[in-house]
């Protein structure tokens, strides 16, 4: 498993953490009345990340006395920053602090750098110093730094939720206690890309078609971000949302990754239904954070009665 | 939660609906397309040429798209106008070209590459200038999708008698409005249609993006009547009786974004005699995509390929 892991892998990530620690979070928050409700207040949060670069997030805080468990929606590989993911019951904001962050390039964090989708995943990939993803990981970690400054969070219940970045957050930041992740583009990226024509992985195929001589160099760069080399650092209890059997990131593909993770892992094979898969994730999180006796908060059309 | 298949949305088509949209169509017709179509060598491959496309739309807003064409076609091609979801980024439609279609994946105003002159953001688009039908965001947004048909008609490699439209979620809603307003559309596939039965949807769901309207009404409680009046002009159900081409609709009965009740109500209103509804129990907003995509392929093959 550890073949091809860069020899300075630890140093690379240590230096990122150090660089980040030297930049104050410098958060500025503003209440967003229009998105606040009788059960939760919504804030816009401006923070500093490496560069320095200003990034933005949506923080929702339940009314009432904390501390509250946290769902941290990590930056996406898409342009739009959502308050909570589309289709999630808005009532979830009555139970959890939710925090969603736009990494550099996404809307609301796109000045001066505005990413293209597709495009972000290979932006600057010609060299270690120009590849955008180091900054994206930093932005992901910065969101957790900000959360730790909030007095009303329950530090024993911080869920990182989303794509590959949720796993990186768990590997690189000690605040994460639980992870719900759907790996899509950072696990063995080049090998996986060779088996698909779907974006975002198709970005790598596009890049190599035009720049075939760059393959070795890009492979070396991507190794720093490859989830398989981060597996052992993940101690948080984790739910991996795998593809359906035969899919690109199915349980077979991810089995070795799962085995190498240090924390307890549940691997859910997609039932090719956003309803069934979504229910599984909501039930998993609710059980882990509240136990068997508490019902998950789900959208109206997912309720049995 | 059981779904009422006989559900009827409360929207009433305004008496001056055709007049309102007729003026928009007239205005659009007076604006030159000014097409720029540049090959994107990074995204093209041995089978497909991909172009970045830009053209002018309503209010002279410059909108963009990805246009994908199979390499070396032997004859004029059938074409698909691919219309996007609400917050997703419009895809590069190489998969459609692999199936033998010229395909324009349009980025209406406010989306990536179409943000320079209009950008209410997300959340935001759904309620932008919602108290006035003449300035509501979707007046231009719908027109941008229709303008995509004009782009396809301008292409010499496209057979103008074989143009279809497809999309899911907001793309489903845009499929409804586009197939209603552009008679050049010969076949349409709408998945989990959004923008249909707005005022019902905001009560049936508790999720974004429809929550944007609830957010707006909570902070602007006196605007309720104006909002409902505006939305009646933009509701897919108000457009649906004007659809005459073959059309298929797919809905998920556990759809947590676009409530299936609105899908049933929409389907009842569609004017085409050649219409079919596919219901997927046990499925959410993806509306049975993994099964249904083969049905969509077969549908367009049947109607657009000779």
Image (spheres, coloured by chain):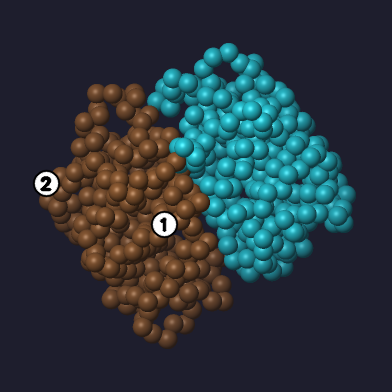
**Residue A143: x, y in percent?**
64, 31
Q: Quick one: label 1 or label 2, which is nearer the N terminus?
A: 2
Which class describes the residues within 10 Å of circle 2: few (<14), some (14-19), or many (20+)?
Answer: few
Q: Nearer the viewer, residue A302 or B206?
A: A302
At horizontal 75% and vertical 37% (from top left) the residue drawn is A237
Q: According to the rendering, which colour does chain A have?
A: cyan
Is the N terminus of chain A in the top left, top right, bottom left or bottom right quadrant?
A: bottom right
Which of discs 1 and 2 lies nearer the camera? The answer is 1
- The picture places residue A48, in percent across and down from the top left corner, at 62, 29
Q: Residue furthest top?
A: A65
Q: Residue at x 72, y 48 (%)?
A: A267
Residue under pointer 2 = B15
Specify the farthest residue to the bottom.
B74
**SS for callout 2:** loop
Q: Which residue is tagged 1? A: B279
State the SS at label 1: strand
Q: Which quadrant holds residue A211?
A: bottom right
Please state the horizontal and vertical placement of residue B173, each as a whole percent of the image: 34, 52
The answer to whether residue A274 is above or below residue A160 is: below
Residue at image position (34%, 25%) is: B218
- Residue B276 in the figure: left or right of residue A66: left
Chain assigned brown? B
> Could you tell me residue A86's position as x and y percent?
49, 41
């Amino acid at each position: 498993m550890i073949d091809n892991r860069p020899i300075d892998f630890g140093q690379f990530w240590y230096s990122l953490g150090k660089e980040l620690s030297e930049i104050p979070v410098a958060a500025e928050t503003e209440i967003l009345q229009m998105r606040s409700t009788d059960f939760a207040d919504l804030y816009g949060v401006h923070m500093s990340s490496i560069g320095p670069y200003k990034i933005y997030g949506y923080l929702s805080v339940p009314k009432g006395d904390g501390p509250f468990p946290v769902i941290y929606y990590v930056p996406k590989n898409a342009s739009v920053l959502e308050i909570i993911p589309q289709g999630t019951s808005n009532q979830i904001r009555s139970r959890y602090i939710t925090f969603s962050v736009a990494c550099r390039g996404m809307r609301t964090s796109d000045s001066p750098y505005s990413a293209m989708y597709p495009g972000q995943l290979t932006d600057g990939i010609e060299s270690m110093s120009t590849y955008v993803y180091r900054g994206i990981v930093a932005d992901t970690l910065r969101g957790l730094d900000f959360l730790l400054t909030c007095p009303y969070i329950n530090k024993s219940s911080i869920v990182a939720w989303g794509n590959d970045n949720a796993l990186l957050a768990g590997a690189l930041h000690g605040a994460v206690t639980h992870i719900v992740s759907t790996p899509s583009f950072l696990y063995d990226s080049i090998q996986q890309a060779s088996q698909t024509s779907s974006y975002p992985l198709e970005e790598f195929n596009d890049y190599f078609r035009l720049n075939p001589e760059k393959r070795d160099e890009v492979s070396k760069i991507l190794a720093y971000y490859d989830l398989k080399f981060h597996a052992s650092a993940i101690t948080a209890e984790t739910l991996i949302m795998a593809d359906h059997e035969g899919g690109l990131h199915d349980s077979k593909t991810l089995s070795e990754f799962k085995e190498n993770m240090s924390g307890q892992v549940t691997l859910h094979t997609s039932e090719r239904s956003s309803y069934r898969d979504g229910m599984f994730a909501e039930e998993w999180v609710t059980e882990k954070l509240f136990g068997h006796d508490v019902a998950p908060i789900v959208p109206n059309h997912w309720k049995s009665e | 939660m059981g779904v009422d298949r006989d559900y009827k949305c409360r929207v009433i088509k305004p008496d001056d609906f055709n007049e309102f949209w007729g003026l928009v169509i007239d205005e659009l017709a007076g604006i030159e397309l000014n097409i720029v179509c540049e090959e994107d060598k990074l995204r093209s491959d041995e089978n497909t040429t991909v172009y970045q496309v830009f053209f002018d739309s309503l209010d002279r807003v410059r909108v963009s798209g990805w246009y994908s064409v199979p390499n070396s076609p032997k004859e004029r091609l059938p074409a698909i106008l691919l219309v996007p979801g609400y917050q997703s980024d419009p895809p590069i439609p190489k998969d459609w070209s692999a199936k033998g279609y010229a395909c324009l994946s349009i980025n209406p105003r406010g989306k990536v590459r179409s943000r320079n002159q209009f950008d209410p953001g997300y959340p935001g688009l759904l309620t932008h200038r919602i108290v006035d039908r003449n300035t509501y965001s979707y007046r231009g947004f719908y027109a941008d999708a229709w303008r995509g048909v004009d782009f396809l008609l301008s292409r010499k490699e496209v057979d103008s008698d074989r143009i279809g439209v497809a999309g899911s979620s907001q793309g489903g809603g845009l499929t409804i409005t586009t197939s209603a307003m552009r008679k050049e559309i010969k076949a349409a596939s709408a998945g989990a249609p959004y923008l249909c039965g707005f005022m019902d949807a905001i009560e049936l769901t508790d999720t974004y993006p429809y929550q944007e309207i609830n957010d707006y009404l909570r902070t602007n409680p006196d605007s309720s009547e104006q909002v409902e009046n505006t939305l009646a002009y933009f509701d897919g159900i108000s457009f649906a009786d004007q659809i005459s081409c073959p059309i298929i609709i797919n809905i998920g009965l556990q759809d947590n974004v676009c409530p299936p009740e609105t899908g049933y109500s929409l389907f009842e209103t569609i004017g085409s005699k050649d219409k079919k509804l596919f219901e997927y129990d046990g499925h959410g907003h993806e509306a049975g995509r993994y099964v249904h995509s083969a049905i969509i392929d077969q549908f367009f093959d049947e109607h657009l390929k000779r």
